[in-house]
Amino acid sequence: MEPKTMKTATTHETAEIEEIVRRIVEVAHPEQVLLFGSAARGTTGPHSDLDFLVIKAGRYNSRKVAGMIYQRMRGIARSIDLVIVTPKQVEEYRDSPFSVVYPAMREGRVIYERKKALA
């Protein structure tokens, strides 16, 4: 079976990603959510998971936030992986090839960005 590309992703797959992101935003209120890994590269297979980089400002326990997000994923058939980082961590690790932030920032697709309030 040929891997799907984002251009050939089904309506169901797109809807599934949108629903996952909606739930992430509902729980975490992030600045940005990026889809990275095979889904962003367009090389997903039938058993591929979805990788999300969640950029959230402020002070928080990332494991606790991840746990709350995973609890909200009940009913989602696809396996997901979450990486939750602060904007400062993104700046610190975006050029470090030994960090998961590096490939996420290089190949990832921004699929949610919080709207900035007008000053």
Image (tube, grey):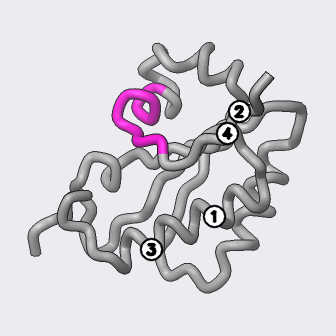
Q: Nearer the viewer, mark 3 or mark 2?
A: 2
Q: Position of residue 4 (x, y in %)?
A: 19, 65
* Residue 119 figure quarter: top right
Q: Which kind of residue does numbered mark 3 sit on?
A: Ala
Q: Quadrant of the N terminus?
A: bottom left
Q: How crowded is mark 4: few (under 14 residues within 10 Å), some or many (20 or more)?
A: few
Pointer 3 residue: 15
- Name the main secondary structure of what is drawn in magenta: helix
Upstream in sequence: badge 2 or badge 1: 1
The furthest residue to the front: 119
Pointer 1 residue: 22
Upstream in sequence: badge 4 or badge 1: 1
CB of mark 2 within 8 Å of CB of mark 4? yes
Q: Nearer the viewer, mark 3 or mark 4?
A: 4
Q: Residues within 10 Å of mark 1 (few under 14, many from 20)?
A: few
Pointer 4 residue: 115
User: Magenta stretch?
Assistant: 102-110
Upstream in sequence: badge 3 or badge 1: 3
Q: Where is residue 96 in the image (x, y as percent from the top left)?
A: 48, 16
Residue 109 in magenta stretch: yes
Residue 16 in magenta stretch: no
